[in-house]
Amino acid sequence: MQAAGPILRALRNATGETALLGTLAGNYGVVLDQIPSSHPVKVVVEIGHAFTLHTAAPAKAMLAYWSGEAQKAFVQKFEFSKKTRHTLTSVAVYLAELKRVKACGYALDRGEESETFACVAAPVFDHRSLPVAAIWISGPSERLPLRALDKLGPQVRHFADGLSHRLGFSPPPA
């Protein structure tokens, strides 16, 4: 997705962390592109890597904008395997998290996949107002402690909104 490159680079430059683009593919998420952090210690993910949805901020960012019925039907198929002490492990808890994500406009991975890194993601919408992708930053937990994630959320959302605009998204009038 050529439209994403400059936005991912700007997001990486603004936050200092690896900026990524991904989407849903069946029962997984898939990494489509990334601009690695310039720090010597960084998160780098293989393009095409498939990630589980119940632990991933980009999945939460996209799924939060599905209808409630579609969310419930889809999430009920998840295998909520526990990866860390922070992993969400039930349909009810996950659906409540999706409500929080939609209310604030961004999603967090608070060490749910691995306690060594954290992520902040926001949805990317197309011209039909559908969440077709997510952009996110990922970095070591020591640079992205829990207290910093909510401060970075609006910044990530700003860049996601920029990419959405490039894809023809026009938010409904307030």
Image (spheres, rainbow, N blue to C red):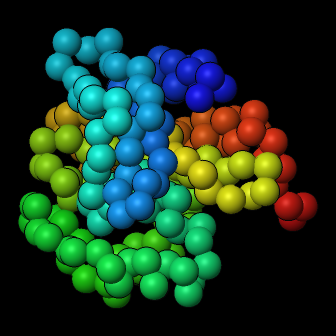
Query: Does residue 151 appear in this view?
Result: no
Residue at screen point 19% across, 54% down? 113
Q: Quadrant of residue 39?
A: top left
Q: Please, is residue 105 above or below residue 159 in the view? A: below
Residue 25 rendering spot, x and y as whole percentages: 43, 54
Quadrant, the C terminus: bottom right
Quadrant, the N terminus: top right
- Furthest-front residue in this view: 26
Residue 79 rendering spot, x and y as whole percentages: 22, 75
- Furthest-right residue in this view: 173
Q: Please, is residue 62 above or below residue 115 in the view? A: below
Residue 111 rendering spot, x and y as whole percentages: 20, 53
Q: Is residue 137 left or right of residue 122?
A: left
Residue at screen point 28% across, 50% down? 51
Q: Please, is residue 32 above or below residue 6 in the view? A: below
Residue 13 rendering spot, x and y as whole percentages: 47, 17
What count of labels does the image hold? 0
Q: Compare residues 106 and 22 and report the one nearer the observer.
A: 22
Q: Is residue 42 left or right of residue 152?
A: left
Residue at screen point 20% across, 74% down? 80
Query: Does residue 126 appear in this view?
Result: yes
Q: Is residue 168 left or right of residue 54?
A: right
Q: Please, is residue 121 above or below residue 85 in the view? A: above
Residue at screen point 46% across, 54% down? 24
